[in-house]
Amino acid sequence: MPRRLKNGPLDEVFGALANPTRRDILDELLDGERTAGELAERFDMTRPSVSEHLRALRESGLIDERQEGRYRFYRVTGEPLVQLIDWLTPYERFWRDRMVALGEVLDRMDDDE
């Protein structure tokens, strides 16, 4: 099996998603753009704390920002999620095959009764 870099883009995505607060921020951003201040109010956090989470999400490519006047707006981006889905696809096939095999066993059990 080929070795992967430990600091590759997918590792950064997993690192960012490992934190539950960051996942919550991503969930919040699915509803649309938000400023750090708006997120701080929703999460009962200080703006510097939210900014740290936003920086990690931005560096992983999961969100991007745009500036309008003195405000920065954050939104979800999809590119890193495509890499994540590509990585997860073989595992999904693995579990689907297992579920099919389980279904076949259960069907045979019904026939035996």
Image: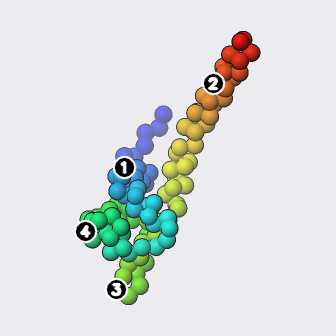
Q: Tell me the amino acid under the disc marked 3.
A: Arg
Disc 2 crowd rating (10 Å Cα; few below 14, some 14-19, many 20+) is few
Res 71 quadrant in image:
bottom left
Q: Are marks 4 and 2 in contact (CB under 8 Å)?
A: no
Do labels 3 and 2 touch, CB within 8 Å?
no
* Mark 4 or 3, nearer chain start: 4
Between disc 1 and disc 3, whose residue precedes? 1
Q: Position of residue 16 (x, y in %)?
A: 37, 55
Q: In the visual, does 87 lie left or right of 105?
A: left
In the figure, is residue 57 to the left or right of 32?
Answer: left
Residue hosting label 1: 18
Q: Secondary structure at mark 1?
A: loop
| Disc 4 versus disc 3: nearer the observer | 4
Q: Secondary structure at mark 3?
A: loop
- Image depth: mark 4 or mark 1 in front: 4
Question: Label 4 vs label 3: CA separation?
Answer: 18 Å
At label 4, the amino acid type is Thr
Q: Residues within 10 Å of mark 3 (few under 14, many from 20)?
A: few
Mark 4 or mark 1: whose residue is earlier in sequence: 1
Question: Residue 80 or 50: which is nearer the viewer?
Answer: 50
Q: Is residue 6 above or below residue 55?
A: above
Tag 1 and tag 3, C-beta contact below 8 Å: no
Q: Which mark is residue 112?
A: none
Nearer-the-camera pick, 76 or 90:
76
Residue drawn at point x = 33 percent, y = 64 percent: 43
Of the numbered discs 3 and 2, the one sitting upstream in the chain is 3
- 86 up-or-down from 80: above or below: above
Image spot of residue 57 (x, y percent): 38, 61
Label placed on residue 70: 3
* Cα distance in 3D space between marks 4 and 2: 49 Å
Residue at mark 1 to residue at mark 3: CA–CA distance: 31 Å
